Image (cartoon, helix red, strand yellow):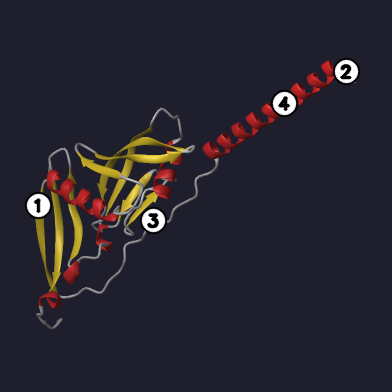
Amino acid sequence: MSKHKITKNVWKRLFYSLIGVNVLIFAGIAALLFWPVPETDTPEPAKEEKKPGSEFVVRTTKQNVNELVNAYIDKLLEGNNHDYRITLDDDVKLVGELPVFSSSVPVSIYLEPLVQENGDVILKQKSISIGQLQLPNKKIMEYLKKYLPMPKWVTVDPANEEIYVAVTDMHIRSNFRVSVQQFDLEANNLAFKINVPYESLGIEMAIE
């Protein structure tokens, strides 16, 4: 076999190998983009025994809540490589970075807060972007659920493109119970109901 023919066969094998690698990469990306997003079970309102106590309504501004939320996030992310921030403006905006294809890309999500009857909040996705990549919204929400640490009482639901914030499941010292009464960002009017059990204050009262 001539040297020219051997060289030609080598280049042909390299060419077909390169095509094979490209096909595998394309197939992997296609599978990543179009693989069905698994359903997420959103929490159901817990039925707890009504304890004697007093209920107060606290009204505040989105600036105060924004500072409180991000202080909580800073504490949650201590020692973690991933980072994100929440901004309350006319909508709820989540800004952070997600690892995609061996690199980190910026992600921005605008969410509409919807107060539920039980005092929890659903953050419904309005718009979403991740760098210059064109990915389906549900896939970005799936990345969000997988990589960004969230409190146990926050559930990311990629299938419905929303985040369920179970405010009523928050564990607060002194056993105070918090629920959302109003969350009007455009009017800058936020109201929370706080239930203070008498037993937390050392007060014993009989239930009639």
Q: Which residue is mark 4?
A: 14
Tell me how far mark 1 sits from mark 2, CA to CA: 88 Å
Residue 94 figure quarter = top left
Tell me how far mark 3 sits from mark 2, CA to CA: 69 Å
| CB within 8 Å, label 1 to label 2 | no
Single out the mark in the foreground, 4 or 2: 2
Residue type, mark 1 in image = Arg
Tell me how far mark 3 sits from mark 1, CA to CA: 28 Å
Mark seen at residue 25: none
Q: Which residue is mark 2?
A: 2
Residue 10 to residue 130: above or below: above
- Closer to the chain start, of discs 4 and 2, is 2
| Residue projecting furthest to the right | 1
Mark seen at residue 42: 3
- Closer to the chain start, of discs 4 and 3, is 4
Residue 7 figure quarter = top right
Label 3: how many Cα within 10 Å (few below 14, some 14–19, many 20+): some
- Closer to the chain start, of discs 3 and 1, is 3
- Mark 4, secondary structure of its residue: helix
Q: Position of residue 17 (x, y in %)?
A: 71, 29
Q: Which residue is mark 1?
A: 59
Residue type, mark 3 in image = Thr
- Closer to the chain start, of discs 4 and 1, is 4
- The residue sitting at 43% across, 44% down in the picture is 143
Q: Position of residue 40 (x, y in %)?
A: 44, 53
Tell me how far mark 4 sits from mark 2, CA to CA: 19 Å
Residue 151 to residue 187: above or below: below
**143 with respect to 116 (left or right):** right
Q: Position of residue 170 (x, y in %)?
A: 25, 62
- The residue sitting at 46% across, 40% down in the picture is 139
Q: Position of residue 79 (x, y in %)?
A: 32, 54
